[in-house]
């Protein structure tokens, strides 16, 4: 599966090899993770209603010092899987200018409007939630969307625009 990154979640962390005798244990065999979370001032809260994360290994082509450079890039992924009650999506390696199967998008209440997660009509059938943090009306949701998928908020219907490959609010004549 080829996934283009549109946006990341708020929560970042890394894991290193457990061999602390290796002087390069913090540089070799490192994995970086990203997930949905909610910021309250300087504090990050994991209010997961759907726990999950994406993972970049050291060989994936991801630059941990500059994560935003991965936005707009396409990666080869294994596809989402469920393990121990969490959704996992492994980004295996960076791909050149290839076509995209899905898009990784993170939506929030402040940017995209309120979503009624209890309603089955908030998303099209092809949208796969990776991670959702929810507290009251505030939320952050990491979603895997296809080119024909959509999500619905109180502001309207959002979809991936074919030319710009960005999440946009549907208006008359835009599609």
Image (cartoon, grey):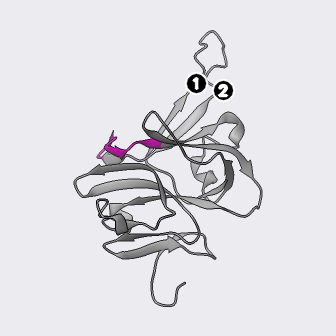
**Residue sitting at x 63%, y 52%:** 70
The residue singled out by tag 2 in the image is: 29
Q: Is residue 56 left or right of residue 94?
A: left
Label 2 close to label 1 by CB (< 8 Å): yes
Label 1 secondary element: loop
Look at the image and say whether residue 24 sits in the magenta stretch.
no
Question: In the rendering, at what x and y percent does residue 153 appear?
Answer: 35, 70
**Residue sitting at x 66%, y 26%:** 29
**Residue sitting at x 66%, y 13%:** 22
Look at the image and say whether residue 45 sits in the magenta stretch.
yes
Q: Which of the marked residues, 2 or 1, is nearer the chain's N terminus?
A: 1
Label 2 secondary element: loop
Image quarter in which the C terminus is found: bottom right
Evaluate whether residue 62 shows in this view. Answer: no
- Location of residue 31 by image quarter: top right
Residue 74, placed above or below residue 32 = below
Q: Is residue 63 left or right of residue 172?
A: right
Tell me which segment is drawn in magenta. 40-52
Q: How many marks?
A: 2
Q: Is residue 41 left or right of residue 131?
A: left
Residue 28, placed above or below residue 121 = above
Q: Nearer the viewer, residue 45 or 141?
A: 141
- Location of residue 103 by image quarter: bottom right
**Residue sitting at x 76%, y 61%:** 97
Question: In the rendering, at what x and y percent does residue 147 appear?
Answer: 59, 69
Residue 63: numbered disc: none
Residue 128, placed above or below residue 156 = above
Question: In the rendering, at what x and y percent does residue 73 appear?
Answer: 66, 56
Residue 103, placed above or below residue 89 = below
Q: Main secondary structure of the magenta part?
A: strand
The residue singled out by tag 1 in the image is: 16
């Amino acid at each position: 599966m080829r996934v283009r990154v549109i946006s990341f979640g708020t929560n970042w962390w890394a894991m290193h090899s457990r061999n602390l005798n290796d002087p390069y244990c913090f540089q070799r065999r490192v994995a970086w993770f990203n997930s949905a979370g909610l910021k309250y001032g300087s504090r990050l809260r994991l209010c997961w209603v759907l726990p999950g994360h994406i993972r970049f290994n050291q060989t994936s082509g991801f630059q941990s010092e500059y994560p935003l450079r991965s936005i707009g890039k396409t990666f080869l992924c294994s596809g989402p899987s469920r393990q121990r009650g969490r959704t996992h999506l492994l980004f295996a390696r960076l791909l050149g200018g290839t076509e995209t199967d899905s898009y990784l998008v993170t939506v929030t209440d402040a940017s995209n409007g309120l979503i009624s997660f209890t309603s089955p009509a908030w998303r099209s059938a092809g949208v796969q939630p990776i991670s959702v943090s929810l507290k009251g009306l505030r939320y952050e949701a990491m979603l895997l969307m296809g080119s024909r998928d959509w999500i619905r908020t109180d502001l309207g219907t959002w979809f991936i625009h074919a030319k710009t490959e960005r999440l946009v609010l549907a208006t008359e004549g835009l599609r």
